[in-house]
Amino acid sequence: MSARVLLVEDDARLASMVADYLGDAGFRMDHAQSGAEAMRLIAADDFDAVILDLMLPDADGLDLCRGIRAKSDIPLLMLTARGDPLDRVVGLELGADDYLPKPFEPRELLARLRAILRRRHAPRSADVLRFGRLEIDKGAREVRLDGHRKTMTGHQFSLLLALAERAGRVLSREALMDLTKGESLEDFDRSIDVHISRLRAAIEDDPKRPRRILTLRGAGYVFAKEQDR
């Protein structure tokens, strides 16, 4: 069955163009023109992904992003105003999987949407990686610390898995982009740092003094083989 996508966009002309283009590509499209309508639809129905414009008439898109992520780990793609990298960084910090600046090419939107859905529906394995109190369940695509599930986006899970599967190896930002099939073209170095920060907030006892995901200045990141000692 084709993926069902909720487009949250108040520009009727743009929404119609996007819905037609993605519909022709095989997606089942729903449209909300406001934040209130979007939250009502998300509460009532199951969607495979959300495309969220940050400029809405009744709500701050970043607040809406926070509200969606508090209730669901659904793949979330933000649409942001060109030239405003702060919105992108904050959106990623709030849990968005990816962003696309306006104006955009429909083909790029389609590619990014397919990418976040691929990460969510990647083939599953029964393997569970264990690092002390931390468990990374590849089959369920879950992360547990002391048995408690940690919420993170699909991209953040893929990033953590790429690091954990290569524990002890230093990985540059470029290597991490390749390993996670990242398709963000602008501000990618910064977005990697944001996702690492989010991962640390989820799995480190003290994110300001990390012991699991370590930074090697000028080189990249390394996932510690020995933890909780």
Image (cartoon, rainbow, N blue to C red):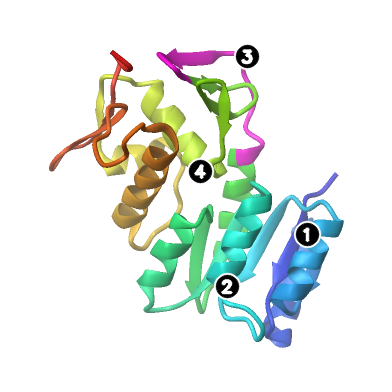
Distance (Cα) linking label 4 and label 1: 21 Å
Distance (Cα) linking label 4 and label 3: 19 Å
**Percent position (x, y) of residue 198?**
41, 46
User: Which element is circle 1 on?
Assistant: helix
Which residue in the protein does label 4 denote?
A: 155
Distance (Cα) linking label 3 and label 2: 37 Å
How many C-alpha atoms fall within 10 Å of the one at disc 2: few (<14), some, or many (≥20)? Answer: many
Q: Quadrant of residue 210?
A: top left
Q: Which callout, 3 or 1, points at the residue further toward the start of the chain? A: 1
What is the three-letter code of the residue carrying label 2?
Gly
Q: Is residue 91 shown above or below 206?
A: below
Residue furthest left as drawn:
218
Q: Which callout, 4 or 3, points at the residue further toward the start of the chain? A: 3
Q: Quadrant of residue 171?
A: top left
Q: Quadrant of residue 131?
A: top left
Q: Which callout, 4 or 1, points at the residue further toward the start of the chain? A: 1
Badge number at residue 126: 3
127 within the magenta span? yes
* Mark in front: 3 vs 2: 2
What is the three-letter code of the residue carrying label 1?
Ile
Q: Which callout, 1 or 2, points at the residue further toward the start of the chain? A: 1
How many C-alpha atoms fall within 10 Å of the one at disc 1: few (<14), some, or many (≥20)? Answer: some
